[in-house]
Image (cartoon, rainbow, N blue to C red):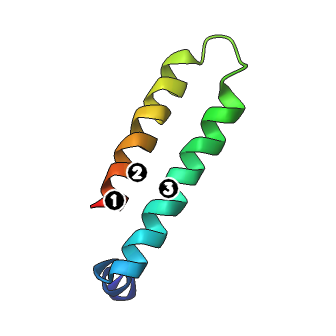
């Protein structure tokens, strides 16, 4: 756990974690969009992706 905290306290580590989260959201949304009944989940993933993107820019 200490290694994870040290990693995320570094700017580069935090950026890598946020980038991985952002790209995972993009992939999941891409896979869910054509499925009927998954619109709410896809919208939540899109909002999370946008929030993570904003967090990376700051």
Residue at 58%, 52% (x, y): give it: 23
Dot 1 lies on which element? helix
Q: Nearer the viewer, mark 2 or mark 3?
A: 2
Quarter of the picture containing the N terminus is bottom left
The residue that disc 3 covers is 21
Looking at the image, is mark 3 or mark 1 nearer the viewer? 1
The residue wearing badge 1 is 57
Would you identify the image quadrant in which residue 13 lies? bottom left
Question: Does the CB distance between marks 3 and 1 fall below 8 Å?
Answer: no
Relative placement, left or right, of 3 versus 25 is left
Coordinates of residue 35 in the picture (x, y in percent): 71, 18
Q: Earlier in the sequence, mark 3 or mark 1?
A: 3
Please identify the quadrant where the C terminus is shown: bottom left
With respect to residue 3, does 18 lie above or below? above
Crowding near the residue tagged with mark 2, few <14, some 14–19, many ≥20 C-alpha atoms within 10 Å: some
Q: Secondary structure at mark 3?
A: helix
Which numbered marker is on residue 53?
Answer: 2
Residue 22 horizontal side relative to residue 12, left or right? right
Marks 1 and 2, Cα distance to the nearest angstrom? Answer: 7 Å
Marks 2 and 1: in contact by CB < 8 Å? yes
What secondary structure is marked by label 2? helix
Residue 29 point in image, percent of width and height: 61, 34
Determine the residue located farthest toward the front in the rendered image: 57
Q: CA distance from mark 3 to mark 1?
A: 14 Å
Q: Position of residue 50 (x, y in %)?
A: 40, 41
Label 3 near label 2: C-beta < 8 Å?
Answer: no
58 is higher (above) or lower (below) than 15? above
From what the image shows, is residue 32 above or below residue 26? above
For marks 2 and 3, the one nearer the N-term is 3
Residue at x-position 36% and y-position 60%: 56
In the displayed structure, would residue 40 be above or below residue 21? above
Q: Quadrant of residue 36?
A: top right
């Amino acid at each position: 756990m200490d290694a994870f905290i040290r990693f995320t306290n570094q700017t580069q580590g935090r950026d890598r974690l946020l980038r991985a989260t952002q790209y995972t959201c993009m992939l999941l949304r891409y896979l869910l969009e054509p499925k009927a009944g998954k619109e709410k989940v896809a919208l939540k993933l899109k909002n999370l992706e946008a929030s993570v993107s904003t967090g990376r820019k700051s």
